[in-house]
């Protein structure tokens, strides 16, 4: 039975997995983008997350009328379960050897899959990253920002993880535009957190620790659309629910505590510095938006967001990034009012508050 199930999961070279929830204004652009891919062995796996508009009806029309419609497969959640659960369902359902995630309001270049898969095959890569372009669409204005990687290849153990953690923005926080060997998920039993905010960041933060052979490409293959109403953008908000931020803090708590497997790896101090710096940015966001967060955070709750899973002697043993790790650790143990005051001063100095 297991062997038969495995065979059912390798019908294509590639699965493009797309969670869909209320994207009717973008769905034609999305589908035209993926269906014009130059590479042929692609499964177009659509995850219906129970939206309330006509998005899925439009995709069903493509199923019936487009020459590649037979390769479009729609699977539905029992109810709206959010992006993390949607990605997990796509991983479970994918029938391709490699998986490529997209967001429903984005587009890819016609050669994207062919280019990434060619490099995956040439170098037996577990991950191939394409570069991307960020397009901001706000107030009838459009701004394009290219985000390009250097052409790089990683083939040695810990090499890629060390590169990622050495600088805060060393690699993208999003899971899209990465061609991923599906066995990276299945052999390691990897899952996305079932939350709606920062689940990509939590996953991509630790993804480098599971792989060795990775390729970065400077070619822009993906267009990331930033707009009002998308999950990843909070421009001009007049009200933020506290539980939304608490969900993000909970996701970071998971990331902080998920350390036993990599505690002895040479990149661990760099990884902890990046994780705790992210927590500091969350705190600065709380302090910057304190007037519109309801109900408000108290000092103790803010201080707890900086709690480290490590003991002081572990931090002091670090041979890399000792000073920033120690400072971030201290923020989590000082009296709450003093901790918040110091973080406010540092946040203002860095232009975050």
Image: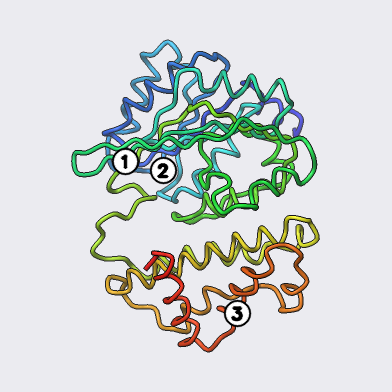
Q: Quadrant of residue 186?
A: top right
Q: Is residue 233 above or below residue 345?
A: above
Near mark 1 (Cα within 10 A), the count class, few <14, some 14-19 or many ≥20, is some
> Is 246 in front, or is 10?
246
Residue at coordinates 51% horizontally, 34% vertically from top-left? Answer: 148
Task: Find out whether the residues at labels 3 and 1 contact each other: C-beta distance under 8 Å.
Answer: no
- Quarter of the image with the C terminus is bottom left
Q: Which mark is residue 136?
A: 1
The span from disc 1 to disc 2 (Cα, nearest Å) is: 25 Å
Q: Is residue 302 above or below residue 105?
A: below
Dot 2 lies on which element? loop
Q: Is residue 284 left or right of residue 295?
A: right
Q: Is residue 85 left or right of residue 156?
A: left
Dot 3 lies on which element? helix
> Is 233 in front, or is 11?
233
Q: Which mark is residue 330?
A: 3
Provide the residue designation for mark 2.
Answer: 49
- Which mark sits nearer the N-terminus, 3 or 1? 1
- Which mark sits nearer the N-terminus, 2 or 3? 2
Near mark 2 (Cα within 10 A), the count class, few <14, some 14-19 or many ≥20, is many
């Amino acid at each position: 039975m297991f062997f038969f199930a495995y065979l059912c999961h390798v019908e294509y070279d590639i699965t493009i997995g797309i969670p869909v929830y209320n994207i009717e204004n973008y769905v034609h652009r999305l589908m035209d983008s993926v269906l014009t891919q130059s590479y042929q062995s692609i499964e177009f796996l659509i995850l219906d997350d129970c939206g309330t508009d006509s998005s899925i009806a439009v995709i069903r029309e493509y199923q019936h009328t487009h020459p590649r419609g037979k390769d479009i497969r729609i699977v539905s959640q029992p109810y709206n379960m959010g992006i993390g659960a949607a990605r997990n369902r796509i991983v479970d359902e994918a029938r391709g050897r490699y998986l490529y995630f997209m967001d429903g309001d984005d587009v890819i270049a016609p050669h994207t899959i062919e280019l990434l898969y060619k490099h995956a095959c040439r170098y037996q890569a577990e991950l191939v990253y394409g570069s991307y372009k960020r397009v901001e669409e706000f107030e009838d204005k459009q701004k394009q920002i290219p985000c390009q990687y250097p052409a790089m290849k990683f083939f040695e153990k810990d090499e890629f993880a060390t590169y990622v953690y050495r600088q805060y923005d060393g690699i993208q926080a999003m899971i899209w535009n990465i061609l991923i060997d599906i066995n990276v998920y299945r052999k390691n039993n990897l899952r996305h957190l079932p939350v709606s905010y920062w689940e990509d960041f939590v996953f991509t933060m630790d993804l480098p620790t599971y792989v060795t052979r990775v390729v970065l490409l400077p070619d822009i293959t993906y267009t990331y659309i930033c707009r009002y109403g998308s999950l990843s953008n909070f421009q001009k908000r007049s009200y933020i629910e506290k539980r939304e931020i608490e969900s993000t803090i909970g996701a970071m708590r998971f990331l902080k505590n998920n350390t036993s497997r990599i505690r002895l790896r040479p990149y661990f101090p760099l990884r902890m510095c990046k994780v705790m710096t992210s927590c500091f940015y969350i705190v600065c966001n709380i302090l910057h938006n304190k007037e519109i967060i309801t109900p408000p955070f108290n000092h103790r709750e803010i201080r707890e967001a900086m709690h480290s899973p490590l003991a002081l002697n572990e931090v002091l043993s670090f041979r890399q990034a000792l000073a920033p790790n120690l400072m971030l650790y201290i923020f989590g143990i000082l009296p709450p009012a003093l901790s918040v005051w110091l973080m406010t001063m540092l946040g203002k100095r860095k232009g975050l508050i």
